[in-house]
Amino acid sequence: MSLLSGWGRYPKADCTLVSARSPADVEAAIVAAPLIARGNGRAYGDAAMNAGQTLAMTGMDRMLSFEDGVLVAEAGVLLADIIQTFLPRGWFPMVTPGTKYVSLGGAIAADVHGKNHHLDGSFRTCVDWVDVMGPDGAVTRTVPGDDLFDWTLGGMGLTGVILRAQIRLRAVETMYIAQETRALTSLSETLEAFEQTLDAPYSVAWIDCSDGPHHGHSLLLLGRHATAQDLPPRWHPFAVKRKRKLPVPFGAPPFLFRGLWLRALNGIYWRRGARRAGHALVDWDSYFYPLDALSNWNRLYGRNGFVQFQCALPEHSSAAGLAELMATIAASQTGSVLSVLKRFGPQSGHFSFPMPGYTLALDFPASERSLELMSRLDEITLAHGGRFYLAKDARMPEAVAKADPRTEAFAAMRKQAGLSDRFVSMQSERLGI
Amino acid sequence: MSGPVLILGAASGIARAIARSFAEAGHSIQLAARNSSRLEDDAADLRTRYGIEVSLHDFDALTLDSHAAFVDTLPVLPEVAVCAVGAMGEQGQSEADPQAAAHILRSNFEGPASILAHLANAMEARGSGTLVGISSVAGDRGRASNYIYGSAKAGFTAFLSGLRNRLAKKGVHVVTVLPGFVRTAMLDGMETPGPLTAEPAEVGAAVVKAVEKQKNVIYTRPIWRIVMAVIRNIPEPVFKKTSL
Ligand SMILES: Cc1cc2nc3c(=O)[nH]c(=O)nc-3n(C[C@H](O)[C@H](O)[C@H](O)COP(=O)(O)OP(=O)(O)OC[C@H]3O[C@@H](n4cnc5c(N)ncnc54)[C@H](O)[C@@H]3O)c2cc1C
Ligand SMILES: NC(=O)c1ccc[n+]([C@@H]2O[C@H](COP(=O)([O-])OP(=O)(O)OC[C@H]3O[C@@H](n4cnc5c(N)ncnc54)[C@H](OP(=O)(O)O)[C@@H]3O)[C@@H](O)[C@H]2O)c1
């Protein structure tokens, strides 16, 4: 038995953890008992937890071939490994989430999105095929256009165990990002700026949802891969550097997350950003993965852990929906240190999270008060035709998940294909998928 | 340093990590294991990640009479040879069935000692090379919970020590690796204390460093050197009543 949790350290549960090191191990596990696959545990909640059997996939981390940016690798390979191996050769992931410590299997199962979703779509953009082991141990190589492909990308491990996949990487000339920072003072200004910069390859905003004078202040970060010409003379396009990770050794005291402190923190962050607004060359790690510089930053929230709320809102109701969400958060005084706003573009697939419009993500300390607030945020999101990201979810009630008609369709498909009694997570049980 | 590195027992979790660390440092790799064709994916991984050459070789530590030919037919005598062969067995079974115990003794001591002896002689003749034996802290003191495995490792540790002494003036170096707990298949289903449990990659990096720096005996993690010093020094009248 191992005490497992997701990245948010909420909820926690004793799970029988079994390690897969080969396809034969996966088959043996599938035959033995119902299970859920687990990648690197970066989903926030209970998506990769099953008390009866959780199958650790990080031991299956072989890279099998690479040619001209096309990589075949086992599901347990981390994006961090892919970058470490191929960035010096001029290749970078086509789509990456805000941490590099995710496995290939986890990136596929959650069909993750990056700061370029508005132009490039979700992770599926770069996936040529996926080998999935089904309930009988048979392996299917599924390709775009297949029903199984559409359910597996975004299917949160509930269509079977992903063994390996072929993905395409992006050719880059340097390891740097040409970044432009804009400091903005309201939600509507921020949305306007997003709409005017839809051709920027990467964009993301940090927006202040706290109560007080800084409410709505944001920093919009635009980026594109720097070319060789962008670099000052004598900069090496792929200089290797080793950064030391700063550990977070113990849980931070909860008072850090009360209103006053937060307001002060967010205010300082914005003013610092505003002072430095403009253009800069930033290395890939600081640009894409600022949080990875602190190992175990999830411990900042203390022993009780934290929960994340992430919703997507359709284009037409984004402005009104975001304003209402932000006002509700501010009024609650529950506080959220990290509030991230992104523009989404078109999305295909049967069950992936993104939809054209906007997505807002916020962390809250796990407490009664936060959970109550999140129920209100659920209602607002649904009222505006939005939906929720399962990779971040730890607490949604079934009814909320099922307000999205795709949930019922997925559950029915799983039942019919004999998947629902083999591939089961605490999340799938909670949501009735 | 960039000559070939031979990994014996290459399917082991620790061995895979050691192979990666040497490949990352630019060495070509010879992977040797029972039924080595199952290591095609591991070979592909090393080639894909590090762009080095990898070859596969069938090897069984228990068929002693094949060892001379095994060394003779390697494409080249390696610069470094690492033996990760080992088997923990079930202590209960080893107690009840001396045959099973003998299998554990042979897998951890007789077989590894035999293949390293052949390699040692060949390296001695050449006048250079490094041998690395993966033994265990379990060999530092026999304990009721796994003394069959532990005694085999104790024998292997003594063998490595003697071999190092013999070859010290012959240009051949011997490294003894004493891992504590390492998160591999060997520990599947066992609960071990986090601070005392290493990831295989840590052991891989430590072994490459030990070879480069010509270390004699390394503990991974280093905290085990202290833990085992304490355990070794508990007086026998007390020790025999403990359950460690
Ligand atoms: C700091 C931080 C920032 C993040 N930023 C973003 C972001 O910008 N965009 C975004 O989209 N996400 C983001 N995420 C979420 C993260 O990308 C996803 O949760 C991702 O799925 C985690 O991958 P993992 O390997 O850790 O998978 P886990 O957390 O272990 O599992 C996640 C899901 O994938 C399934 N799964 C994993 N491996 C397999 C497999 N081999 N076969 C079948 N199913 C499998 C699991 O069953 C589970 O449902 C972020 C997370 C963190 C901690
Ligand atoms: N994991 C730990 O906590 C730990 C601690 C201290 C020491 N060690 C030692 O570290 C070494 C590697 O172990 P591990 O943890 O990586 O476990 P492992 O994965 O179980 O590795 C043991 C390896 O030994 C091989 N082997 C056994 N008998 C063999 C034989 N007759 N011929 C050829 N190969 C044989 C096995 O090959 P097959 O795949 O063919 O079975 C297996 O690959 C072992 O010597 C072990 O005793 C491990």
Image (tube, coloured by chain):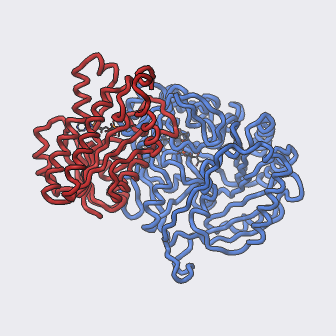
Chain colours: A blue, B red
Image quadrant containing the N terminus of chain B? bottom left
Which quadrant of the render holds ligand 2?
Answer: top left
| Residue shown at 39% from the left, 64% from the top | A68
Residue B68 image position (x, y, % from top left): 11, 45
Query: Is residue B195 visible from the viewing direction of this image?
Result: yes
Which of A286/A155 is in front? A286
Which residue reaches farthest top? Answer: B96
Residue A99 to residue B89: above or below: below
The residue depicted at 74 percent of the width and 72 percent of the height is A277
Determine the residue positioned at 15% across, 36% down: B63
Give the camera-side residue of A274 and A246.
A246
Count the numbered circles shown: 0
Q: Is residue A150 left or right of residue A281?
A: left
**Farthest residue, direction bottom:** A233
Does A359 sit left or right of B232 as displayed? right
Please indicate, yes or no, whether residue B10 appears anywhere in the rendered image: no
Residue drawn at (32%, 57%) of the image = B214
Image quarter hosting the C terminus of chain B: top left
Give the image location of residue A328, x and y in percent.
84, 46
- Please determine whether, in this image, residue A333 is positioned above or below residue B173: above
Compared to A170, does A130 lie above or below? Answer: above
x and y, in percent, of residue B139 in the image: 33, 34
x and y, in percent, of residue A260 in the image: 86, 51
Q: Quadrant of residue B92?
A: top left
Which of the 4 image quadrants contains residue A398?
A: top right
In this picture, residue A413 sits left or right of residue B172: right
